[in-house]
């Protein structure tokens, strides 16, 4: 198989370039496309959960769903535990590449592996030369700046949602639960959220999507955003009893109906 390696937080355009490069080699060699990722960021393994500052662009399930969109044949999700963090670069290559009979390993130029992140793409090539081909994917730029998860997090933290979405190459999704008084409780406390402000976006409740205007508060331990107005034709109390989960989605699709915005998600 051809294996694309990385954390892939956000599965942004740079990540998609890595996956597409792996796909190309798979097609040329008639090999299945596999992706190996990790269940959490390395910084979360040793951090105090109450003080952890890392913020994700998506949940693990959302990442899995995005990989399905990319039509990968196999997805390996490795538990990033303290034991895994202690794995030497040599053991990583043996256990996760050679033992899996990987024929081509593909990763971005800045991919690291093994204890303390001591393994880099040069070492990967050296350790695997007798067993598999190593392909290094160069950085992908946009306006002379590297597309990275860090850059996208910064854009979201500044409220630049359209710019963030353009680098992701797909929608940005925040999951929450419906509360009384037109509020939505954000359920993933470790997700990167926009700053305090009012945003035009979509909500998905059940299978229906609606254009909305949402007020995000100052970020707290349990942020709850306020639905100010919503572009709805019909959404009865019966519907609300059936669904308590909601997704907040960027970008806004189509033109928002200012007149219809006088209606509310909650009746």
Image (cartoon, rainbow, N blue to C red):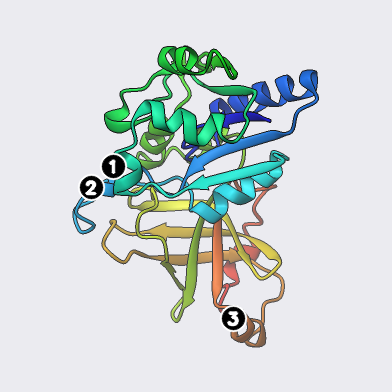
Residue 81, image x, y percentages: 34, 49
Does dot 3 land on a helix, a strand or a loop?
loop
Residue 124, image x, y percentages: 46, 18
Locate the N terminus by quadrant. top right
Q: Residues within 10 Å of mark 1 (few under 14, many from 20)?
A: few
Residue 257, image x, y percentages: 66, 56
Residue sitting at x 22%, y 49%? 47
Q: Which mark is residue 79?
A: none
Q: Residues within 10 Å of mark 3 (few under 14, many from 20)?
A: few
C-beta proximity under 8 Å, tags 3 and 2: no
3D distance between C-alphas at marks 3 and 2: 46 Å
Which residue is the site of mark 2? 46
Rendered view: 44 above or below 138: below
Q: Is residue 69 visible?
A: yes
Query: Camera-side residue: 151 or 252?
Result: 151
| Mark found first going from the N terminus, 1 or 3 | 1
Q: Which mark is residue 267?
A: 3
Rendered view: 71 above or below 94: below
| Mark found first going from the N terminus, 3 or 2 | 2
3D distance between C-alphas at marks 2 and 1: 6 Å
Residue sitting at x 46%, y 17%? 127
Does dot 2 land on a helix, a strand or a loop?
helix
Which residue is the site of mark 1? 43
């Amino acid at each position: 198989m051809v294996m694309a390696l990385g954390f892939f937080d956000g599965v942004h355009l740079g990540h998609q370039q890595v996956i597409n490069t792996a796909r190309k080699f798979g097609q040329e060699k008639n090999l299945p496309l596999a992706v190996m990722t990790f269940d959490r960021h390395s910084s979360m393994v040793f951090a105090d959960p109450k003080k952890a500052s890392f913020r994700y662009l998506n949940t693990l399930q959302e990442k899995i769903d995005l990989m399905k969109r990319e039509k990968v044949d196999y997805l390996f999700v490795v538990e990033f535990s303290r034991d895994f963090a202690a794995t030497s670069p040599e053991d990583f290559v043996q256990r996760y590449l050679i033992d899996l009979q990987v024929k081509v390993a593909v990763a971005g130029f800045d991919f690291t592996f093994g204890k303390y992140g001591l393994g880099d793409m040069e070492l990967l090539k050296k350790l695997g030369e007798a067993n598999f081909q190593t392909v290094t994917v160069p950085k992908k730029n946009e306006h002379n700046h590297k597309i990275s998860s860090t850059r996208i997090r910064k854009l979201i933290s500044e409220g630049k949602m359209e710019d963030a979405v353009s680098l992701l190459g797909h929608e940005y999704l925040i999951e929450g639960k419906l509360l009384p008084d037109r509020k939505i409780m954000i359920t993933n406390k470790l997700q990167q959220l926009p700053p305090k402000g009012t945003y035009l976006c979509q909500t998905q409740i059940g299978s229906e999507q609606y254009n909305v205007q949402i007020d995000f508060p100052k970020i707290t331990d349990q942020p709850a955003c306020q639905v100010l107005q919503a572009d709805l034709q019909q959404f009865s109390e019966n519907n609300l009893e059936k669904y308590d989960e909601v997704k907040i989605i960027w970008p806004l699709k189509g033109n928002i109906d200012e007149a219809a915005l006088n209606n509310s998600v909650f009746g």
